[in-house]
Structure formats: structure tokens, C-alpha cells
Amino acid sequence: MSWNYITFLMGWFLAVSTVSTAAELGGGSTPLPTSSPSEDQLIIQAILGENAGDFATSRDTFEKLFALTDNKEYLLREAQDALSEQKDQARSITNLTQWVKRHPADHDQKLYLILAALYIQTHALSEADTIVDTYLTQGNVDAEDLQEFGALKIQLGEYAEELTLLQQAYAQSPSEQTALQIAALYSLKLQQPEKATAILEQHIARDPETSVGTYFKLIEMYAKHSQIGKVLALYKQLYRKDPQKYFLQKIIEISLYQKDTQGLIHFLESTKGNEDLLYGVYKDNRLYAKALTLAQKRYADTHRARWLSEEAILTYEQARDEHHLTPKVLDTMRRLFERGISEGNHESIYLNYYGYTLIEHDMDVAKGVDLVRQALGKDPKNIYYLDSLAWGLYKQGHCRKAATLIRRVVKKEGMSEPEIKDHYKAITACLNHKKH
């Protein structure tokens, strides 16, 4: 009899109970059974006992069912209730042991697992060990058997034997779950962390499509032993599988922590969709030639005016780094900034940069001051924009106004920036000269 049928009977029982109650309420009567309970009625009684936590009733009833039918499933159900009740396990052990003696060819995994668990619960560990070994030597043991009975070996404290069983199971069926179990055994019980990482490395190499959880477990093991390079390599592998923002963030963080700029650049160059990030790395590391090429490509791809302004900045910065700021370079820079503005780029950072450059090189101080004022209109408290305006006003001869601004800048920012320090000295000198 299947347990699906038992479930059906439960539904039938509840329906009959409802009808009986309704009949009683209506004044009718329902005849009570006078004969011995049937198998179906006993099943219902046993299940009701289980659901109510009355394992004494359910166990007695399942034993009656077994005596009535000689069906092993009832015997197993009684033993499961014994495990739940944690009481009088000897009775269930006797029942199962007698069954095994009468049916030596019955290699039911469930039977042996329950019997071993009963022995463990009663602290009869040697008997439990014997039951496990008996099952494992019967032949036709598959990977699931090895895992299930291996778990009992852990409860028996036999970690080396558990390891052997799990390794045999993995050899038969190299599943992710088994690899994780082996890794946990090496790490937590056998204190061999290098072998724990080795099994997960082996599994990921065998099956790169394994779950992210296994990757994270290996990352956790690497991090615990400060193997940061291997952590980075796994995040890169994960990103190539699934380009999630979180993985990319970790790659950047670790690369910067290790000061591995070249490694980060190589990775970004080899992946798609990270051009803006790659551009930032080029620019921050003064790789102006590569940054210029990429900025030009981004403009061609997106037609965003911002990239024209970026190209203008790179043109200027590269020439300044190379000590080759010629009128031609300044003219090219100016032309690119003007194109960017005409095509709609009015971001404050670019307006200030362009305005300050016009002021610094005396190209068009009035225009430069106007551009800086526009930038301040978008970001009034920006200290660097205020510094630019102070410098522009100084260049126009408005020393008093310039001094008021530069004092605000110094009060807020100090004079750690060389340009601010130079501006403060020049403006202060101008103000003192005018006083005399």
C-alpha cells in the first residue's frame, strides 16, 4: 500500500467526520462500527496519533498494522516514530533486527539507516558501526548510499572512514554536494584546509557551471588564509560566467588593494561593457594615449558631447606632462571644449576646467571667468570652482574680491594644494601692493 493512498484515506476520514457531525447536528444518527478496525481505519488512527505528537499511540497502531499485514513499511514507520519520541528504542531495534534475520536478502537502504540511527540514539555505537559496515559490504552500493551511510560515520566520529566513503561517492557521481561535504570534512574535522580547497578547485575545474555558492565557499577558504590573488582570480572567473556588478566591484577593490593596475587594465580590456570604467583607469594612471583613443571611440559610438570635453582635457594633460604645451595644443583643446559645449555638455566640472585653463594661460580671462561662474551656478559651494574664480578675478585686477574668495578657499581646504597656495600668495601680494 502506498503512502499516497494513505493520504487519500486521511482526506476520506476528514470528510466522513464532517458528514457525521452534520448528521448529528441535524438530529440523525450514524451507526458505529462494531467489528475489528480495518487496515484503513488503523492507518488513519496511526497518522492522527503522529500529527498530535502522540507517538505511543502511533507506534502501537503501526505495530498492529505490521502484525496484520506483515508489511515492512509499517515496521519502518513505527521505528521512525521511535526516533521522534526518543523513547523505548530497544523495541524498534528488536523488530527491525528480527526482520533482517528473516529477510537476509533485503538490502533496503532505509531500513539499515533507521536501525543504525536507533543504535546511535541509544549510544550503542559499535552496533551502529556494524550495521553500517554490513550494508556497505552487501554490494550494489551507489553514491547515494555512500553519502547517507557516510553521514552516520560522522556521528560515530569516524572521520577518516567518512572521507573514504565520500571520495568513493564522488568517484561514482562527482556532484557539487559531495564535493562540498568532502571540503567541509577536511576543513572542520580533519584540519587539512589545503585539501579542502583542492577538492573545490578540482570540482570547479571539472564543472565551471557549478553554483555560485561553491565559488563563494572556495573564496571564503582563500580569504581565510590570505590567498588574495586566488580570490581575485575566482571573482574574475565568476564575472566572465555572469557579469554581475557585484563581481566587478570586488575585482576593482581587490585589484586596487593589491595595486595591480596592469592586471585590472588587462581584465577590463578583455571584457565587454566596461569601456567607461577602463577609460577612468587609463586616465587616473596617465595612460593618455590609450585614454585618448578610447575617448574618441566612445564619442563615435555614443555621440555624447561629454567625450569631446574629455578629449580636450586629455589633450591638455598629455601635453603638460610631456612639457609640450604649445599654442597649437591649446588651440586644439579650446576647439574640442567649444564643440562639447555647442553639442550640449554643460556639466560644471568641464565648464570650470575649461574656464580655468583660459584664465591660467591668459587665453581669454573674461570668458574663463564667465565659464567658472556658470559652473558655480550649478555647484555654489565647490571650493575648487571658487579658487578658479578668485584666480580669474586676480587676473582681471580685482584683488580685493579675489582675496575674499581665496580666504574662503584656504579656510575650508587649507594650503596643501600647491595651486591654492600659489594663488593665495599672489592674491595676498596683490592686495598688499594696492594698499600701499
Image (cartoon, rainbow, N blue to C red):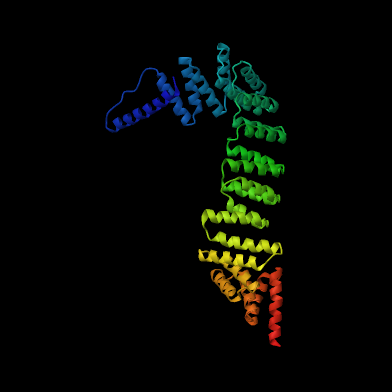
Q: Quadrant of the C terminus?
A: bottom right
Residue 323: quarter of image? bottom right
Nearer to me, 206 or 280: 280
In this rendering, the count of numbered labels is: 0
Q: Nearer the viewer, residue 59 or 249?
A: 249
Residue 125 drawn at (x, y percent): 66, 24
What residue do we see at 54% from left, 29% from top?
84
The residue shown at (58%, 56%) is 296
Horizontal relation, residue 196 to residue 69: left or right: right
Report if residue 321 is visible in the image.
yes
Q: Is residue 153 above or below residue 398?
A: above
- The residue under the point 62% across, 41% down is 237
Does residue 351 appear to the left or right of 288 in the view shown?
left
Q: Does residue 207 sit above or below 343 in this rendering?
A: above
User: Where, quadrant-wise, is the N terminus in this rendering?
Assistant: top left
Q: Which residue extends farthest left?
A: 27
Quarter occupied by residue 381: bottom right
| 83 or 246, nearer to the observer | 246
